[in-house]
Amino acid sequence: MKNLDERTITQAVIERNSTSSNERLVDIMHSLVKHLHSFAREVHLTEEEWEMGIKFLTEVGQICSPTRQEFILLSDTLGLSTLVIAQNHKKPLGCTEATVFGPFHVQNAPQLELGSNISEGVNGTPWFVSGNIQGIDGEPIPNAVIEVWQADDDGYYDVQKENLNAYQGRAVLKADAQGHYYFQTIVPEAYPIPHDGPVGKMLEALNRHPWRPAHLHFMITAPNYERLVTHVFKEDGEYLDSDAVFGVRSSLIAKWDHHEEGLDPNGNFQYSPFYTLNFDFVLNKQKVN
Amino acid sequence: MKNLDERTITQAVIERNSTSSNERLVDIMHSLVKHLHSFAREVHLTEEEWEMGIKFLTEVGQICSPTRQEFILLSDTLGLSTLVIAQNHKKPLGCTEATVFGPFHVQNAPQLELGSNISEGVNGTPWFVSGNIQGIDGEPIPNAVIEVWQADDDGYYDVQKENLNAYQGRAVLKADAQGHYYFQTIVPEAYPIPHDGPVGKMLEALNRHPWRPAHLHFMITAPNYERLVTHVFKEDGEYLDSDAVFGVRSSLIAKWDHHEEGLDPNGNFQYSPFYTLNFDFVLNKQKVN
């Protein structure tokens, strides 16, 4: 392997990588090296551009922290996340579609009772969310675990707030024996993804805005069903047609009903306007391997 | 841009990226997104593998520091560096070939006089290096700036040594009016690239060793000539056929002559064996844009 040049290097790297006993890794690296090199050849990448790429990726890695995942943002904004999710969740018609996971999920969110107010003290317009978790044949899925997380009405998640050491706008709930779920929170607003880092600079250079339409995150798990990671978007919300992370599906857009002051779904009197959302989730049967 | 799926997402991202006034960036991102997505489709990347990829890239970024550039190591070990250098330095036959820059160059290395001992106190077998800097027609290139850097005889660069706040084995020299250069140092040994990080783990998973054959780095610049970044490798050295970063060119392998104790090229008596290397560099004319 001497005298490699721009024509012979790709095959040389693929051969060097081919002796591992991990066949899946060999296949992945084969395709990765082939496409990485094809990219560099196709655009005739210069050394200065290569240096900019090294610098960019280094900055992406260095800004990552326990509460910020810039590589997920990069994957999201380049559409890779949507591609990977779509090709791994082909489902029968009628199942709720999956969408991007996003960078703001955290482990160990508080486990709250059905009906709880998960906003945990954040100000905002009250919102009463409810629905059913069911299978493709309409069967209720009892006791499904429902994790929800959301931005506040300034567009920030709890983990983005410095000096906040509490969970806000996130919880793990459990559907009841009939697969019914309900909780109270506040209405989240559209927000820009964190754009003070390298991904934000990339979007700016590409003449792209960093905004996501208003949405509520759900991750729903139940034995014998495929895990569902998805959002529910607000009908008529801004940015539905230009979500910075390519996460919108028409089937995930729902009416967030506005109500004037009056009785809320819990029978309590609300002295200011509030919203309700009713959304049912249809889970796919677990693939049997 | 709703209802994107694994078939439509790629074109949607390319279109979203296409409105920037930076045409070169648009072209680069078009090719990058196309190949990134083709890779994910071709191997049917799973969500678990995507997560492993995010984690790997994050680790690569986080281990970077002012003295460690893991993304360059990644580029080097995947052959991307060799490809980019090769396609940007096609030269007339007779010019010295370029090879990888590597991660151990530093800015502001000490400027030393011709003939200096650049090892700066590191122990090792004395080595007297000399040669000429010339153009393709044999014309001497006077006063060329010659930056050299190297590992010691344990295979470490100065920047890898904790608690060392001095330069060792690196210098900026200036060829004389006839293009002649000469300096003293110690013989560098083969060494493994830093493999205690994510790139090392990758090499291990791929059943690859991290070793580079013994070499001396040169970066040579002179007005009106193309900058040359290259190595000189040791003839008969280990790993010439399996350099972890694909940097070897036959034309860059030279005899490092062994001498028993006796007079060195400076006319001083060496009481132990020493080496000499004579290597001429042929620079390409600067491209006129």
Image (tube, coloured by chain):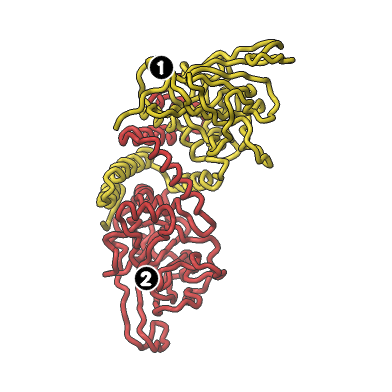
Chain colours: A red, B yellow
Frontmost residue, A10 versus B248: B248
Say if labels 2 and 1 share a chain: no
Q: Residues within 10 Å of mark 2 (few under 14, many from 20)?
A: many
Q: Give the quarter of the figure containing the C terminus of chain A.
A: top left
What's the amino acid at mark 1? Glu
The reply to whether residue A214 is visible in this rendering is yes
Q: Chain of mark 2?
A: A
Give the labeled residue for mark 2: A189
Give the labeled residue for mark 1: B139
How far from the left and from the top, in percent, is residue A14?
43, 28
- Residue A240: image quadrant is bottom left
SS for callout 1: loop
Of all residues, the one furthest to the front in this rendering is: B177
Left or right: where A124 falls relative to B153? left
Name the residue at 57% across, 16% down.
Answer: B277
How far from the left and from the top, in percent, is residue B106?
54, 37
